[in-house]
Amino acid sequence: MAVLRQQGYDGASLSELSRATGLGKSSLYHHFPDGKDDMVGAVLAHLEQTLEADLFAPLRGDGPPAARLRAMNRTLDAFYDHGQDACLLANLGIGESSRPFHPRIRQIFARWIEALAAPLRAAGLSPSVARTRAEDAIARIQGAVVLARSLQDSTVFARTLRALPTELLRR
Amino acid sequence: MAVLRQQGYDGASLSELSRATGLGKSSLYHHFPDGKDDMVGAVLAHLEQTLEADLFAPLRGDGPPAARLRAMNRTLDAFYDHGQDACLLANLGIGESSRPFHPRIRQIFARWIEALAAPLRAAGLSPSVARTRAEDAIARIQGAVVLARSLQDSTVFARTLRALPTELLRR
DNA sequence: GTGCCATTGTACCGATCGGTCTACCGGTAC
DNA sequence: GTACCGGTAGACCGATCGGTACAATGGCAC
């Protein structure tokens, strides 16, 4: 996952993946018979599981909406290493949209949006407003990561996360 | 530029660049002796020039701030093809930050931020507020492109652009 | 022990990578 | 005409690409 998020699909060569995993090529192809796409699929499946547990489930939880949003912030801050690490979803989703793993990217983003909309509805916002705000928030997070990495300055990322909870719940 | 923004640095092979430009390899290496990095450099230089003329200069212009922001929107909407085209800066900036062209990416983003802050200051916002708002706006645009492409739904992009002028000038 | 099977290291495959070389073209100078 | 030269095509280079073949390893069933 680290190789993919940093190098992207084309940059993540098999020898790099082999080195990073400590597995020889034959082992990689034993576990992932369909090659690179298979490995990417496994990485995305694992990411989806992780996000489900650490991000989506807390968002859907039954605590106060503001607390759920703060939980998301904590997870994201760790996940992106304070905005210094690239986003795997963005790196894979920004390229060719015809890649076999692209539907999975879309699905993960869709789940994130849906999970984030939940606490906003719980706070009394209409479903449609909750949804558009969730989309906008995720766009802001993604853009903050892109900009923080491009500028090599994580200020934007920190500021974006800090502002989100109150702005999302504003009436 | 089209190949680079769609395929990214590693995905943009020389044969692809050759095909897209209609030039043989030897011609490419005649004009860009230092190879791929040289070509990327030229693309970024050209992009910077284009942005300077179509985006930054209008932002710095002397019309009403709201009109300057609407001009930015028009340029961006065309530039990203309503959110369907990837962003070259994001695609190159999201990867390894040690690449030789990375300083140029950073510089272009910095100029964009500075240019966008100008109409905000002209509207009476303090320099520091203008700057952070400019940064946030560019992050939102970048994130909107990432999300629109990942979801294959340009709604987020359109909504983001539409909301920007009034939100940026809000007191 | 023996057989079995999942797993692994290593050599190897054709294709493509980024990049170089040489021969050639088409204009311009004289 | 001829010398020159910016530009070009395409063969070619070693390295690396994604992927395969195959023999060896190692643990487990019996």
Image (cartoon, coloured by chain):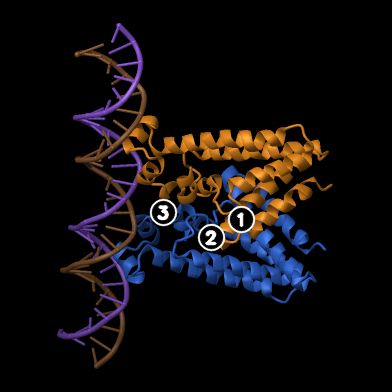
Chain colours: A blue, B orange, C purple, D brown
Residue A10: mark in rendering: 3
**In the depicted view, which residue is nearer to us: A52 or C17?**
C17
At 71% from the left and 65% from the top, the residue drawn is A69
Q: Are marks 1 and 2 in contact (CB under 8 Å)?
A: yes
Disc 1 is placed on an element classified as: helix
**In the depicted view, which residue is nearer to us: C10 or A91?**
A91
Give the answer, above or below, for where D11 lies relative to B6.
Answer: above
Identify the mark nearer the N-term, 3 or 1. Answer: 3
Tell me the amino acid under the disc marked 2: Leu
At 62% from the left and 61% from the top, the residue drawn is A76
* Image quadrant assignment for residue A164: bottom right
Mark 1 crowdedness (10 Å alpha carbons): few <14, some 14-19, many ≥20: many
From the image, tell me which residue sits under label 2: A89
Give the answer, above or below, for where A64 lies relative to B32.
Answer: below
Tell me the amino acid under the disc marked 3: Asp
Mark 3 crowdedness (10 Å alpha carbons): few <14, some 14-19, many ≥20: some
Chain to which mark 2 belongs: A
User: What's the CA distance linking mark 3 and mark 2?
Assistant: 14 Å
From the image, tell me which residue sits under label 1: A142
**In the depicted view, which residue is nearer to us: A159 or A117?**
A117
Chain to which mark 1 belongs: A
Residue A127 is situated, as x and y percent measured from the top left of the image, at 74, 71
Q: Is residue B17 left or right of residue D29?
A: right
Identify the mark nearer the N-term, 1 or 2. Answer: 2
Tell me the amino acid under the disc marked 1: Gln
Mark 2 crowdedness (10 Å alpha carbons): few <14, some 14-19, many ≥20: many
